[in-house]
Image: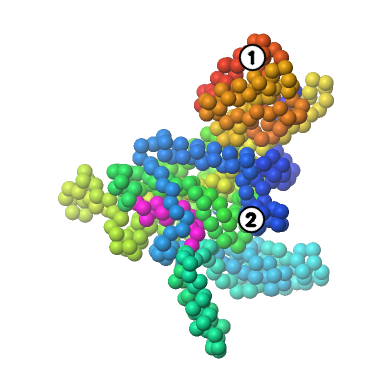
Amino acid sequence: MANQAEPAQGDTMAKIVSLCKRRGFIFQSSEIYGGLKSCYDYGPLGAELKRNIAAEWWRSMVYERDNIVGLDAAIMMHPQVWQTSGHLAGFSDPLVDCLNCKERFRADKAPRAEPGSQSVFTTGGKTGGQKHSATVTAKGYVCPNCNSPGLSDERQFNLMFRTAIGPVDPLADLTKELAGQVLSAEKIREMIDEAVRKTAVYLRPETAQAMFVQFLNVQQSMAMKIPFGIAQVGKSFRNEIVTEHFIFRSCEFEQMEMEFFCEPGTQKEWLAYWRNERMAWYHRFANSKEAFRIRQHATDELAHYSDDCYDIEYLYPWGWGELEGVSSRTDFDLSRHAEASGVKLSYFDQQKNDPATGKPGWRYIPYVIEPAAGLTRSVLCFLADAYAEESGVDADGAIKKRVLLKLHPRLAPYKAAILPLVKKDGQPEMAMDLVAQMRKLGLNVSYDDKQSIGKRYARHDEIGTPYCLTIDNDSLKDNSVTLRDRDTATQERLPVAAAIATVQRRLDGSI
Ligand code: GAP
């Protein structure tokens, strides 16, 4: 079939979400019970894709460098960590309720409107009953659902999930204490908060903090010399007010973060280095390089701990959005944790003179550069980058459409599919033998004998398998296969060994 590439168009997101379910990449969590808001399960192929992305990140951050080591920390940490890091006091979003349609939303994400202007809205939401008009207040925004300017006051909503550790019911004693008492609502709330606080632990909202609190253990156990980094991939949790765009913003997600500890004064050059390294990493695996861009944070956008920050953004089907933040975190975290714990989280460099005294030996608190990427968000980015629809003319002159995922072979769930043309004449046996050979080489390949060969090609195009190796009657005679390339749909007759070598060469980047 001659192919003509067509840019993914129309409702691309809906098509990606549908493909993800149909082909076993991503399912709604607890779907048979109606699903749970913004929670997703990675199916057989999604689990492979996610693992492959994480493995490539780990390879580029840890295996290919001498000065970065890994960590796999507990999700629950001492609550003091979050007190010290500022998350308990400040990791919150401004929450507002619409008094008209009852929508709950983030004030900072709401549609802007000129104070004093009129906003037209309908009762009961966008498609509801009567039209009304009201004056936009000094807040300068309206409800994202119905446009009403009639809104509650903003209140800060902490994004951390709180739970309790240990077999103690924090409310048991309190309930006894409160029984029979007449107290104000505020007083009861205060007492409940106090009781809950005693056993409270939090699900980490970022993987980063463990790398700060384990700085000394890692540095000493591995004899690391500055500059060095600690890398981690793992789950994070945020009770997001607005979850959106499938897996783009969810309450449970995965991050790939690295804390790079460097000498004070060198942070600018390391920030530039890591910004470029991370951009190059995305480019290595993407089809459309122009869909990635770097955006520097404005001063008023910087987090309280940061003196400079760049976002790597991707052009998602709905527009540009964050994919990764590369931030210069100063010595904020190590200083705060050192102060709160009483443990010296510093580094002694014998080779350097102390700039303050000019004497040999310099003890300092390292500065930190943090490339913080979303793993689950990268899954969405690479799916969107890979999704393509093509039309072409087949051998009979008929127009045929095909959907394909042009995933980089290293990210693709299967590296090749092995297809016996028919389920007889020794073809399945030869195919299974080839599968075993390729698995021995560490290649995740799929044996597939279901349905017609055309349908099998279409299925593997849609799940991003870079090559299909088809076995027919001639294969048994001359030990050859037909190698079909996913992206060009071209077919080539090759000896088995040459076909395996092609799959391998594509993986190691030599073709
Ligand atoms: N340690 C710094 C930190 O966590 P962040 O910008 O809040 O920084 C880093 O998060 C990355 O984690 C983001 O660029 C994004 O890719 C991902 N991320 C953050 N919140 C997310 C969410 N609710 N759902 C999915 N991914 C998220």
Q: What is the distance, in whole Å, between disc 2 and disc 1 at their CAs?
A: 48 Å
Q: Position of residue 475 (x, y in %)?
A: 67, 14
Which is nearer the eye, 166 or 87? 166
Which is nearer the eye, 27 or 310? 27
Is residue 414 at least partly visible in the picture?
yes
In magenta, the rendered stretch is 202-215
| Residue ID for mark 2 | 38
Crowdedness near tag 1: few (<14), some (14–19) or many (≥20) residues, C-alpha within 10 Å: many
Position of 68 with respect to 126 (left or right) is left
Q: Position of residue 429 (x, y in %)?
A: 66, 21
Quadrant location of the C terminus?
top right
| Residue ID for mark 1 | 480
Confirm if mark 2 falls within 8 A of ligand 1: no
| Furthest-top residue in this view | 478
Is residue 291 at least partly visible in the picture?
no
Q: Earlier in the sequence, mark 2 or mark 1?
A: 2
- Residue at 62% across, 49% down: 41
Quadrant location of the N terminus?
top right
Instruction: Give the SS element for disc 1.
Output: strand
